[in-house]
Image (tube, helix red, strand yellow):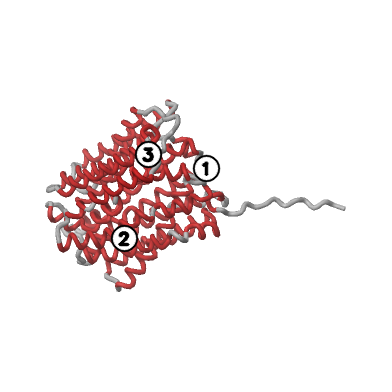
Amino acid sequence: MENMDSTVIATSLPTIAGDIGSDPIRLKLALTAYLLSLATFIPISGWAADRLGARLVFRTAIAVFIVGSILCSMADTLGDFVVARIVQGAGGAMMTPVGRLVLLRTTPKAQLLSAMAWLTVPALVGPLIGPPLGGFITTYIDWRWIFWINIPVGALGILLVTIFIDDVRSETPRTLDKLGFLLSGVGLSGLVFGLSVMGQNMLPFPVTLAMVAGGAVSIGLYLVHAKRVSEPLLDLTLLRLPTFFTGVVGGSLFRVGAGSVPFLLPLTLQVGLGMNAFQAGGLVFFSAVGALLMKATAQPIVHRFGFRATLIWNGVVSSATLTAMALFAYDPPAILIVSLLLFGGFFRSLQFTCLNSLAYAEVEQPRMSLATSLYSVSQQVSLAAGVAIAAAVVELQRELRTGHIIEAGDFVIAFAVVGAISVAGLLFYVRLSPDAGAEMAQRDQPVPRKPVAST
């Protein structure tokens, strides 16, 4: 439900923008608002699941998401739409982290890679259905109806959670770090929001700069605070684990690039090439197909090559396919677009699966909720940064041309920039031990050779 909603909005962005009196670049604020809402509320997801139980938190999160969807369908201005997306983000903040926490606490590490790969299969139904469905509804009916889809889907989700999700909770729940939640929330929201509007002329530059600076100061204060309390909301000592550090820092660079795709791709096809929402959605469909095809191959690939080699070489290929999307601005043959989307979806999905699994290779069970919260925050902040950076580059290209209309060529540099950021993750992958995550990869450990007795 969450992924379908995001892909529908990304595909329908130009139409929604025209209807509420905005433009596609400014409306990307709605995408970023959702992500910054996630970044603000995800830190308490682990604590909430430990304290209240996974089942209750999951059901409540879905209900809040449904309310946000109804508000989106009623929005008439950019401000209304942004506020509605923030409400959706508050609900979405609990869905994925809590679901992942249940999986991490009930699955042996030897089976975790395969489980993490298939965990995202239901989420891939959204990208598969979302673009063509959203494009069809937007083109032939009314974009507001795309949000009503979440009501029956959400109701079904609440029923399934009630039946199948165990009431997983910690036997010794932590005390809520209220000051830590305040500092991290203010810091993350200020930083992400400020970066997203910078260069968009939405706010005076001094105001935007103050938001970014205030967010950075708040995060700095949280870092000091976290060292002084016994139970910080976000436990930064987890970054001492090499595999978790790589998943967070190296993975964030990759996710900046991948996070820009839902924003850049539909705009390139619609604004740059003149496709309607339904045509663009039909093409975006192939990227999700490639991601789905990868799921059965993740375990064999990592078992054969190991996490380190897979992340390095797949990181190069996935970043190359991301940069190559710049070719779409030159109206290439449809077969080239489809092929690049199919293979790009495959390799990006493999990188996501490896990073999301390896991050927990060295985390002990009692710290899983802390690890899930911190890792999920890094995921959403980097995805928000991807949208913000891509939009800023496109806007800069338009300003340099002194033009008022976005052109296809404006997206070329944007794809190159996010591709370069994505490939920078290799600086961290190469530092991994060759046997990193060996238990998850189910790779045989080298057996020491016994000395041959002399005769």
Q: Secondary structure at mark 1?
A: loop
Q: Which residue is found at the position 65% from the left and 52% from the top?
A: 446
- Spot occupied by residue 174 in the image (x, y as percentages of width and height): 41, 29
Can you identify the residue that label 3 sits on?
A: 54
Query: Which one is in front in this view, the residue at disc 2 or the one at disc 1?
Result: 2
Dividing the picture into quadrants, the one containing residue 226 is top left
- Spot occupied by residue 417 in the image (x, y as percentages of width and height): 34, 56
- Spot occupied by residue 422 in the image (x, y as percentages of width and height): 39, 54
Q: Which residue is found at the position 50% from the left and 40% from the top?
A: 363
Q: Which mark is residue 116?
A: none
Q: Is residue 182 above or below residue 376?
A: above
**Residue 332 in sight in this render:** yes
Query: Which one is in front in this view, the residue at disc 1 or the one at disc 3?
Result: 3
Three-letter code, disc 3: Ala
Q: Which residue is found at the position 80% from the left and 53% from the top?
A: 452
Can you identify the residue that label 1 sits on?
A: 362
Mark before the other along the chain sequence, 1 or 3 = 3
Can you identify the residue that label 2 sits on?
A: 128
- Spot occupied by residue 90 in the image (x, y as percentages of width and height): 27, 40
Position of residue 438 in the picture relative to residue 130 (left or right): right
**Residue 201 in sight in this render:** no
Mark 3 touches mark 2? (CB < 8 Å): no
